[in-house]
Structures are given as structure tokens and as C-alpha cells.
Image (spheres, rainbow, N blue to C red):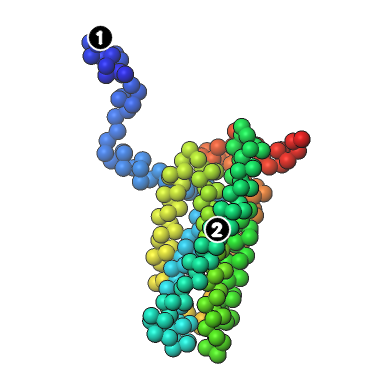
Amino acid sequence: MPIKQRKETQDDRFYAPMERDIVTPIQRAERVLARPFIIFIQEPMLIALTAYISFVYGCLYLLFQAYPVVFTEGHNFSAGMSSLMFIPIPIGGTAAVILYVLIYNPKYERLAEKFSPNTVPPETRLEIALIAGPLFSISFFWFAWTSFPSISFWAPMSSGLLMGFAICWIFLSLINYIVDAYLPVAASAMASNTVIRSLCGFAFPLFANKMYAALGPRWASSLLGFVALAMVPIPLVLQRYGPGLRQKSKYAPSKDLVTLEENSGDP
């Protein structure tokens, strides 16, 4: 240790590099606060993934305004009864986690053995998003066109099962991809992602009432479904072009990764 050596030898020439790296509080704050957003604006993959996750997160919070429109105003439920309509969403999310643990985790462990000693390509994480993305879009169309007061409340309520399932798998897929793809700067990548998606979670409920009043429950929910449908190709594009994008990135490691195509040819 440099400190111990200085004491023993009385020679100030012994020092650790970090001791000479003098950083002011302002510079330290800039490193901590600005770095996540510097990385964010330089990474198209991170921008696309954050946009998708933020939209899904915002839609989840928007439901706190959409459900009262459909169930309190449309079906004349009390506030307490309307709150019960959210129950299928966590049930769907729980089912998603169980299937993830029982089906996807063992598959990933087999891939880890197959690619050893190399790292499993992050693109394998996107497989479940390719399933969950269309399901998330379908769930909003389901919720939209079963929200007529003349239709049983069970129909729009049940759409929450599919919605909760899709939200959970989208988050598991895309967040794991961000961590794997940006491993050396994963904390910074997730920091910018968390800030932006939290802002969307704050903002979406603010315009939900006006949107549902202007478009009606059917077309307001359908609009969200169409936007969700437009985002479905994001994981597909990254699965196809992700390795090439990572090779061009300053922050996403790729030199030690073996692509799926290369490994699939192994005996």
C-alpha cells in the first residue's frame, strides 16, 4: 500500500494513481449526474430500448386514469369496485415470472454452457420481447373494444391478464439486454433509462383524462395499441443488427462475444 510504504520509507514518491486524481465536488457531480445522459445520447440502441420501456411504463400508469373512465363512468362502479379491476394485471405478471423461471431460465443456462467460455450474446435476451410486444398491443385493443357499457365488465377486466403478462416479459427482456449489452457502464445505462421512464410514468396520467374525453375509451385505448404495435419491431431489429451496432459502440463490449450465427455452426 502506498501509504504504508511512505510511512516506512519516508519517501513521498510512493503514491497510488487515484491519489493524484484530484476531482472537485463540481467535477464529481458532473461525472455522476451527466455521464448517464452522455452515454444515452450517443447510443441509438439505448435510445430505442428506453423509448420502448418508457412507453410501456407510462401506459401502466395511464391505466390509473383509464380504468375509472371505463369502469366507474361506463359501468357505474364505485371507486372501490373499480380498483378491483386491476387484479388481473399482477396475476398476469406473476404468470409471466413463473413461465420465465420454468422455461426461459433453463434455456439460458444451456446457452451459457454452449457458449462457454464466451459470454452469451445479449441478443438472446430479446426472444421473449418478440412474443410480449405483440401481446401488449393486443391487450390494448382487447381493452378498447370491450369497454362498451353494454359488454360485461369481465371482458375489459380480463385484458389485464394479457397486459400484465406482456409488461413483465418486456421489462425482463429489455432491461436484461441493456445490462448485458452495456455491462461496463450498466449502472449509467440503467440510470438514464430509469429517469426517462419515471418521467413518462409521471407524464402519461396527466394527459390521459383529456385523451379519453376527446377520443373516447375505444379510440384512446386503440391509439395506445397502435403505438405499441409500432414499437414491436424494435427487439426484432436489435436481434438482427445488435451485434453490428455493439461493434461500433464505445460502451457496449463486443470483442469477447460470439454471435449466435458463429456458434450455431459448431459441432
Q: Which mark is residue 176?
A: none
- Which residue position is annotated with label 2? 98
Q: Is residue 121 visible?
A: no
Percent coordinates x, y for residue 2 in the rendering: 30, 18
Percent coordinates x, y for residue 38 in the rendering: 44, 45
- Which residue position is annotated with label 1? 9
Residue type at mark 1: give it: Thr
Q: Is residue 115 left or right of residue 199?
A: right
Q: At numbered mark 2, what does the secondary structure look like: helix, strand or loop? A: helix
Percent coordinates x, y for residue 204 in the rendering: 43, 69
Residue lying at 27% horizontally and 35% vertically, measured from the top left: 24
> Considering the image in quadrants, where does the N terminus appear?
top left
Residue lying at 53% horizontally and 54% vertically, measured from the top left: 172
Q: Is residue 16 visible?
A: yes
Residue type at mark 2: give it: Ile
Residue lying at 41% horizontally and 67% vertically, measured from the top left: 203
Percent coordinates x, y for residue 199 in the rendering: 40, 61
Above or below 115: residue 95: below
Instruction: Give whichever of 63, 253 is nearer the camera.
Output: 63
